Amino acid sequence: LGLPMGLPSTFLGTHGWVQYYCKAALREPNGLTHKNQQVFIVMNPI
């Protein structure tokens, strides 16, 4: 998997932010579900 080209860089400012995360859920045959979420940073050259 890859990210689309041209995504804005991660940013945190006084009036807003741009943040990316990956969210996953894994369901086992016994019905148990594992969930996780991970924030990541995107840095594009200026």
Image (spheres, rainbow, N blue to C red):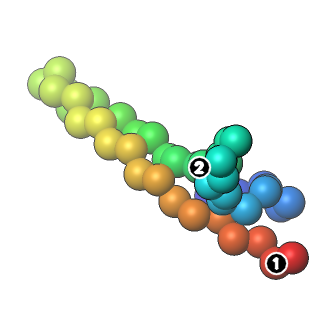
Observer-nearest residue: 9 or 28? Answer: 9
Q: Is residue 2 visible?
A: no
Q: Secondary structure at mark 1?
A: loop
Quadrant of the image occupied by residue 3? bottom right
Observer-nearest residue: 12 or 20? Answer: 12
Which residue is depicted at the point 66% across and 59% down? 10
Q: Secondary structure at mark 2?
A: strand
Crowding at mark 2 (Cα within 10 Å: few <14, some 14-19, many 20+): few
Observer-nearest residue: 6 or 19? Answer: 19
Q: Which numbered disc flags the more N-terminal residue, 1 or 2? A: 2
Which residue is depicted at the point 69% across and 71% down? 43
Task: Give, as a three-letter code, the residue at label 1.
Answer: Pro
Q: Is residue 36 left or right of residue 33?
A: right
The residue indicated by pointer 2 is 20
Q: In the rendered view of the protein, which quadrant contains the N terminus?
A: bottom right
For the view shown, which residue lies furthest in the front direction?
14
The residue indicated by pointer 1 is 45
